[in-house]
Amino acid sequence: MNYSTTQAFHITAGYVPKASINALKATFAFNDFFLRRIGAYTSMEKGLNSDFFTNIFGITGSLHKNIYMWGGVEFFTKNGLLNSDISGLDKVRKEFGVGIILIENLLIKGGWSQSVGPTFGAGVRIPI
């Protein structure tokens, strides 16, 4: 069985269901570009009925050709790492999750953040 990964862009749209946030999420990732296992991503979330906005940057790591994990932190926005002092690190948005490539180049994702709870997404994988 071949467990080889292939460099690819992942583009997903998702949702943050926490009632006080109620946000749409867009994620752009470039997976498996380093050692055919490690990549990078950014995700943006915008509240539908609020001024909530985040822009998270992080890394991805492939566990199998169809399964990858990711984790990241918010850097530049209001509660970002660069706008917080040492005592405020608990307010910095952090997230992690798992993505699964289902059929061909369709994928689903599920994530978790202590500050917003679960996140969900679906999208496409575009091999390079």
Image: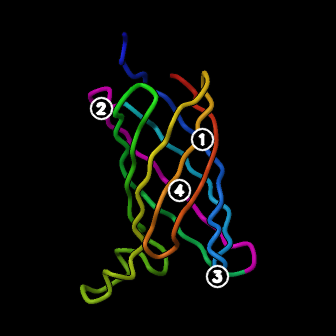
3D distance between C-alphas at marks 2 and 4: 20 Å
Residue in the picture at 45% in, 67% down: 113
Q: Secondary structure at mark 3?
A: loop
Mark 2 packing: few (<14 Cα in 10 Å), some, or many (20+)?
few
Say whether disc 1 or disc 2 marks the residue closer to the N-terminus.
Answer: 1
Tell us which disc is closer to us: 3 or 2: 3
Residue 34 is labelled as: 2
**Image spot of residue 79 (x, y percent):** 44, 80
**Residue numbers of the magenta segment:** 33-49
Numbered label attached to residue 43: 4
Residue drawn at x 38%, y 58% as measured from the top left: 72
Give the residue at mark 1: 11
Earlier-in-chain disc, 3 versus 4: 3
Under tag 2, what secondary structure?
A: strand
Q: Which residue is mark 3?
A: 20
What's under tag 1, amino acid-wise? Ile
